[in-house]
Amino acid sequence: VGEVLIDVLDERRFPASEIRPLASGRSAGRRVRIRDREVEVEEASAESLAGADLVFFAATGALSRELAPVAAGLGAVVIDKSNTWRMNDEVPLVVPEVNADAVHDHSGIIACPNCTTIGVVMALEPIRRAAGLRNVVVTTLQAASGAGRDGLEELVSQRQALAAEPGAALVPSVFAAPIENNVVPLCEDLLPDGYSTEEMKLLGESRKIMSLAELPISVTCVRVPVGVGHSATLLVETERPLSEVEAREALSKFPGVELVDDRESGTFPTPRDVAGRDEVLVGRVRENCAGKGLWLWEVSDNLRKGAATNAVQIAEVLLERRLLAT
Ligand SMILES: NC(=O)c1ccc[n+]([C@@H]2O[C@H](COP(=O)([O-])OP(=O)(O)OC[C@H]3O[C@@H](n4cnc5c(N)ncnc54)[C@H](OP(=O)(O)O)[C@@H]3O)[C@@H](O)[C@H]2O)c1
């Protein structure tokens, strides 16, 4: 996410006078390319944060817990990608197309939602604005890179192992079961009630972002052998009747969403279509033949709109609204 963030800041010409890459002691001294310059990576510490106006955290929850308040105390605005601050009442949780105004409530830290949540709320919000939401059922199909570089490397190494020896035994480390040539119906940790921590994040964060504290939403998160690009199916029951034609119109008008839904040619969005893009692609819009509601299919790049791009968009809102030192 940090590497993609550096690219996105450059692509969007974010007006920073200086960008300093920080990581752990393991990477300190490495050189990375930022805007055609080689810059040395520093170890993240209280000292390394001094003088910053804006600090993006895309590391571990523990690091955000320790250093985000330090950065905020030094006068910076923190945009945090970890899970640490998202459900804190004092911290806005922001997807700019949905709840940009929430940035005004920050006290130094703004949280960026989970990569899965962002795609899901981007698909839900246009439907909500058109007809309200009564009940939502989601199943996600999440890419290996959603579990960071280690997750992506586990997929690639298992793929190579099976290519070299089709019957090779695969030993999972990041994921709950072998990920290559498989589908794993568990993301992160299982809770006593049978749901996973990832499923609970999607539930709580979606309610917070859309300010729908009571929204009934039930989730199954599944890991699939895809490198980049999370997908989800959503069964959405609305407060007021909404035809599939009206739903398509609402989705196609919503900023950041692109409707890709051509039944005649059989064109629907896939993770391969979305990797490297910032739009959330939505398709397979159809009425539920077994009851009320509409089905949607959504895909988004978990490293871009699901993480880096959303974080940079939050920073752009801060700039536009003069909430950041310039
Ligand atoms: N992957 C996604 O799709 C995604 C989407 C949304 C949110 N997120 C969240 O974004 C964060 C980063 O995820 P990622 O996928 O980019 O993980 P990652 O590939 O594992 O990278 C983690 C980065 O954090 C750095 N780091 C780890 N411990 C550190 C420490 N003690 N001090 C300073 N830096 C430290 C690592 O530095 P070294 O290179 O030195 O080890 C590395 O650069 C996580 O909180 C994750 O939950 C990820």
Image (cartoon, rainbow, N blue to C red):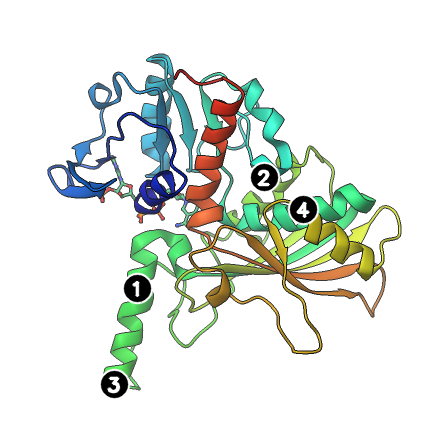
Neighbourhood count class around disc 4 (C-alpha, 10 Å): few under 14, some 14–19, many 20 upward: some
Q: How busy is the neighbourhood of tag 1: few (under 14 within 10 Å), some, or many (20 plus)?
A: many
Sequence-wise, which precedes: disc 3 or disc 2? 3
Residue 2 visible? The answer is yes
**Which of the marked residues, 1 or 2, is nearer the chain's N terminus?**
1
- Marked residue nearer the N-terminal end (4 or 1): 1
Disc 3: which residue: 165
Element on which disc 1 rests: helix
Q: Amino acid at mark 1?
A: Glu
Q: Which mark is residue 128?
A: none
Q: Earlier in the sequence, mark 1 or mark 3?
A: 1
Q: Check the image and name the residue furthest to the bottom.
A: 166
Disc 4 residue type (three-letter)? Phe
Which of disc 4 and disc 2 is earlier in sequence? Answer: 2
Rendered location of residue 52, percent (x, y):
30, 20
Marks 2 and 4 in Cβ contact (< 8 Å): no
Please indicate whether residue 60 sits to the left or right of residue 229 in the image.
Answer: left
Q: Which residue is mark 1?
A: 154
Residue 254 - label: 4
Question: What's the amino acid at mark 3?
Answer: Glu
Residue 84 sits above or below residue 266 on the image:
above
The residue drawn where x is 37% and y is 24% is: 54
Quadrant of the frame with the C terminus: top left
From the image, tell me which residue sits under label 2.
205
Q: CA distance from mark 2 to mark 4?
A: 20 Å
| Local secondary structure at mark 4 | loop
